Image (cartoon, grey):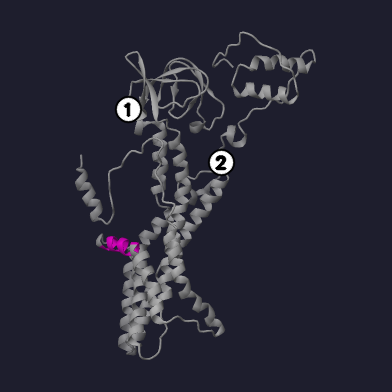
Amino acid sequence: GTDVAALTAAVEKAGYKAHLRQETPPGVAPTVSANAWWPVAVAAVLSLPLVIPMLGMPFGADWSLPGWMQLALATPVQFWLGARFYVAGWKALRAGAGNMDLLVALGTSAGYGLSVYLMIAHAGHGMPHLYFEASAVVITLVLLGKWLETRAKRQTTEAIRALNALRPETARVRRDGQERELPAARVVTGDLVVVRPGERIPVDGVVAEGASQVDESLITGESLPVAKHEGDKVTGGAVNAEGLLVIRTTAVGAESTLARIVRLVESAQAKKAPIQRLVDQVSAVFVPVVIGLALLTLLGWGLFAGNWETAILNAVAVLVIACPCALGLATPTAIMAGTGVAARHGILIKDAEALEIAHKISVVAFDKTGTLTEGKPQLVAADAVDGDRAAFLAAAGAIQTGSEHPLARAVLATAKAESVQLETAAQLRAVAGRG
């Protein structure tokens, strides 16, 4: 196999970071930082005083700040909050590629550098028009796009956290005829795990002893418990309803069904939407073209018009205009809006690609129970042969008092709603899987 160190070095040489995947412990979910909003807020607060004077210009108002104050506001946005674009752009450059971060770094640096130059060059001749606000606002908008993308991912991360919470941290293992509580991570394939009524099943396995009803709604969406007997497969995270089960372990940890589902969601999160991949592909060609156009603009205006200050200004304009802040903001905003609306309606979208190609859907297949229905059975008709409905419900309800089955609860709920006095039943016994 390939040496891990060599593989990591190759990935880092290409401008990316790599590390060995660590298995997430039970009950702990990978998190997407909830504090990622503060760089956007700080950038907006620092950029706003630079933008406000522009709002007064159409009305003839001059609210321009002194040059040194504009410099003080723009510098933290450019080199502190915008540092991520320099780092990512430099890595892309080293890898011989161009990406959106490189364009942002080039365009905003050009605007910032030009403003510093104009401020110094015209120090004794009044304050010229500066362009600090353009650089600061571009960085703020792209940071906003990154935050919106992170926020959309956090909605899916909540689903991962909910799945991880279903993993029991301990298991009751039977070894050498003795039962002992062990951390779930120490259970191995072949171990016999004892699961009592009402407990979550800690491992994937096969029923070795006992019979019960198992709630597998987390996997199948089916709200009604499923009968399990010896030889039937069970899934870790499902709830054992009524009987004692002894389960022979077939999969634990990273190989369990629950862990594979979590990995699937995490993998989906890491994927870029096709439109974002297209942007990166275009950037690989677009970046050198933009730099070439900026150089041509600089040389054209400088050599033929003779005004190098105007030449620099126009070259910088090419770089700033080429900043893809619209793409950096529009794609994450669309993804966030789509996933957010879907989440409010109980729909979990696997990844950005699924959302993007959803317009091609022509057929939708629904799981009925718990999706189109509430998953809570109700008694809609009860016709007694002799016509005595109350006596019929009293007898039926008496039999169902010893069961926790959803259909039994439906009968009892109807009897209670109609104020039926239940009879007393003796020698009740639930026979699993027999209806």
Q: Look at discs 2 and 1 and give the one toward the viewer.
A: 1
Q: Point out the residue furthest to the right here.
A: 387
Count of marks, rendered view:
2
Name the image quarter holding the N terminus: top left
Camera-nearest residue between 49 and 278? 49
Camera-nearest residue between 335 and 84? 84
In screen coordinates, is 2 left or right of 417? left
On the image, numbered disc 1 is attached to which residue? 186
Please give the name of the residue rendered at 47% of the width and 56% of the height, measured from the top-left corner: 148
Q: Is residue 310 above or below residue 185?
A: below
Q: Position of residue 106 (x, y in %)?
A: 33, 70
Camera-nearest residue between 279 and 259? 259
Chain part drawn in magenta:
84-93
> Which mark is first along the chain, 1 or 2?
1
Residue 261 lies in what quarter of the image? top left
Q: Is residue 373 magenta?
A: no
Q: Is residue 92 magenta?
A: yes
- Mark 1: few, some, or many residues within 10 Å (few <14, many ≥20)? few
Q: Are marks 2 and 1 in contact (CB under 8 Å)?
A: no
Q: Main secondary structure of the magenta part?
A: helix
Secondary structure under the numbered disc 2 in the rendered image = loop
Q: Using the rendered image of the protein, determine whether residue 327 is visible from the camera's viewpoint.
A: no
Q: Position of residue 11 (x, y in %)?
A: 25, 51
Q: Using the rendered image of the protein, determine whether residue 358 is visible from the camera's viewpoint.
A: yes
Q: Amino acid at mark 2?
A: Val
Q: Is residue 225 above or below residue 137?
A: above
- Mark 2: few, some, or many residues within 10 Å (few <14, many ≥20)? few
Q: Amino acid at mark 1?
A: Arg
On the image, numbered disc 2 is attached to which residue? 364
Q: Is residue 406 above or below residue 337?
A: above
Please give the name of the residue rendered at 50% of the width and 28% of the height, measured from the top-left corner: 216
Q: Position of residue 316 (x, y in %)?
A: 36, 77
